[in-house]
Image: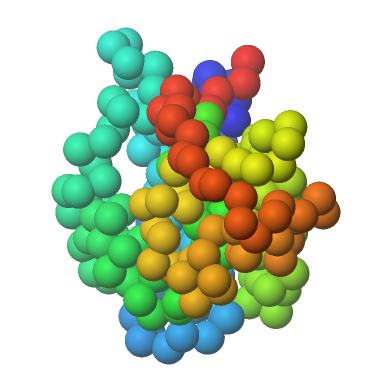
Amino acid sequence: MNYAAWKANPADVAALERVVQTIAAAPASAANTPDQLAFHLNAYNAWILREKVNAYPDGKDPSVLSILPYFNKQRITVAGKKMSFNNLESDLIRPRFKEPRIHFALNCASVSCPPLLNEPFEGPKIGAQLDRLAKGFVNGPGVQPSADKKSVAVSKIFDWYKEDFAPAGGPVAFINKYRSAKIPANAAVTFQPYLWRLNETK
């Protein structure tokens, strides 16, 4: 994300603000439909972008760590309800939709986060969008098998949210569902350090 260019364009900043205010004013729904999943994923990513663009440059820490307190503070509004990013992800999206692929759709603005999709999520095509993101992630640096394939270093995401991948049989089984070069089922799993550096391009 080119935060500097976005921040330098008042029209783009204003457009992003309109998006999050529309999300804030949207009618509440308890449905777990594809449209609602798309809405909540878009809400998370839009609010993260808004926070980073507004704070850029933060002057102290060029990483997402500079806004970590925001993850636990009720400072965003989604469908009329004040909440935190953690509320949105772990208290709403994860338990309501029970969809492990969301972990490759939510972007927290750090280098180790899955890449931000360059289009909004939409209910009618969200299955295909989530499949594309999952395939991209497990075939990328988030999954690094050893040369002998006896071990594999995977993103810390698979450790933090291991219960979400358990129904698929665990990280390796989930990865093999989407990965081109399969990982042996008995491979030893280790977890990569998470890089919190800002996902900034210049």
Give the x, y percent position of residue 37: 51, 74
Give the x, y percent position of residue 136: 72, 49
Q: How is the image coloured?
A: rainbow
Q: Is residue 163 left or right of residue 74?
A: right
Quarter of the N terminus within the rendering: top right
Could you say which is closer to the camera, residue 33 or residue 186? 186
Give the x, y percent position of residue 176: 70, 61
Residue occupying image coordinates x 37% and y 84%: 29
Q: How many numbered marks appear?
A: 0
Q: Is residue 191 left or right of residue 123?
A: left
Could you say which is closer to the camera, residue 186 or residue 94? 186
Give the x, y percent position of residue 162: 41, 60
Residue occupying image coordinates x 46% and y 85%: 32
Q: Is residue 82 left or right of residue 10?
A: left
Q: Mark yes or no: residue 180 visible.
A: yes
Q: Mark yes or no: residue 10 visible.
A: no
Q: Residue furthest right?
A: 180
In the displayed structure, would residue 151 be above or below residue 52?
Answer: below
Could you say which is closer to the camera, residue 9 or residue 117? 117
Residue occupying image coordinates x 52% and y 47%: 189
Residue occupying image coordinates x 54% and y 71%: 169
Could you say which is closer to the camera, residue 75 or residue 127? 127
Quarter of the C terminus within the rendering: top right
Q: Residue furthest top?
A: 59
